């Protein structure tokens, strides 16, 4: 499996602990910078949810904000995400405007990775534009209402990799324990068969276990919250780090 290196972090190394991604988001830049300044130790990647920024359609505003956020995070990789409403975010824009904004973010100094939603009709064009700007690409898909079968989830991970993702991300909504098991099965099979790292999770309370021990099945990263969560089921950073440390002691001992 190929690995992805961003700053001092390498994603996708077999057997490695998961990278911990923490989101920052607010309507005003000053609040985002305050969140960034207050991040404790234990964060590996910071995800900036661009769609929460007031005026995120303004490329100059977004570019300036990205530079300031990156400067407030010395040494930490920055993942820029424009999450649209169909996938649980706040952004509403045409596919052309979406591609243009992804291109702007990817070309902005300090942005190491960008998220591209696979469901967009111009997703491949957005991936190409992001690579041209020098950013690594997380191609993502969010199932907000259900959990597909394990075979279908593997097919969706494969489609995102074929779209050019350096990393593929799949989030699903479980309704019963078997949904969670299907997600972990798909992740484990992907680790054995695929060429690019995957980040997978089941959302909500039922899926919390996938955020805590998903790396044992092959998920390269997990998300944690410092303050407000950006998606249902994100554990607190301190709680997550405690679990990861405990799991590491047992599995490495």
Image: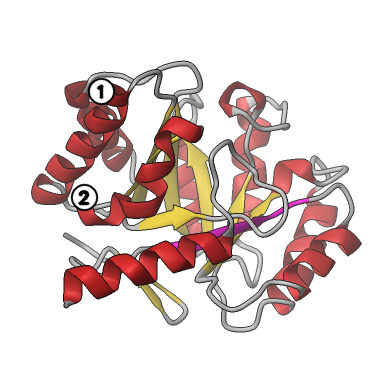
Mark nearer the N terminus (1 vs 2): 1
Give the structural element (helix, strand or loop) at label 1.
Answer: helix
- Residue 93 lies, in percent from the top left, at 71, 27
248 on left or right of 235: left
Which residue is tagged 2? 217
71 on left or right of 146: right
250 lies above or below 104: below
Q: Is residue 24 magenta?
A: yes
Give the structural element (helix, strand or loop) at label 2.
Answer: helix
- Residue 20 lies, in percent from the top left, at 47, 63
Q: Is residue 117 magenta?
A: no
Magenta residues, start to end: 19-25
Q: Which mark is residue 178?
A: 1
Q: Quadrant of residue 118?
A: top left
Q: Main secondary structure of the magenta part?
A: strand
Alpha carbon distance from label 1 to label 2:
16 Å
Q: Quadrant of the image for the C terminus? A: bottom left
């Amino acid at each position: 499996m190929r690995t992805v290196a961003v700053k001092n972090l390498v994603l996708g190394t077999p057997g490695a602990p998961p990278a911990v991604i923490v989101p920052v988001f607010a309507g005003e830049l000053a609040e985002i910078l305050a969140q960034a300044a207050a991040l404790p130790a234990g964060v590996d990647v910071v995800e900036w949810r661009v769609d929460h920024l007031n005026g995120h359609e303004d490329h100059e505003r977004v570019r300036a904000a990205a530079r300031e956020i990156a400067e407030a995070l010395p040494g930490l990789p920055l993942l820029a995400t424009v999450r649209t409403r169909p996938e649980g975010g706040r952004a509403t824009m045409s596919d052309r405007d979406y591609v243009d904004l992804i291109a702007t973010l990817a070309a902005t100094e300090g942005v190491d990775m960008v998220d591209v939603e696979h469901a967009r009709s111009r997703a491949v064009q957005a991936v190409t534009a992001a690579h041209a700007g020098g950013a690594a690409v997380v191609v993502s898909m969010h199932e907000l209402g259900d959990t597909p079968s394990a075979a279908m989830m593997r097919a969706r991970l494969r489609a995102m990799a074929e779209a050019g993702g350096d990393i593929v991300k799949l989030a699903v909504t479980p309704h019963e324990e078997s949904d969670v098991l299907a997600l972990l099965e798909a992740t484990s099979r992907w680790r054995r068969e695929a060429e690019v790292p995957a980040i997978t999770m089941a959302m909500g309370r039922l899926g919390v276990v996938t955020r805590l021990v998903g790396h044992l099945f092959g998920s390269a990263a997990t998300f944690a919250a410092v303050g407000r969560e950006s998606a249902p089921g994100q554990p607190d950073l301190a709680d997550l780090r405690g679990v990861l440390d405990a799991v590491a002691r047992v599995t490495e001992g």
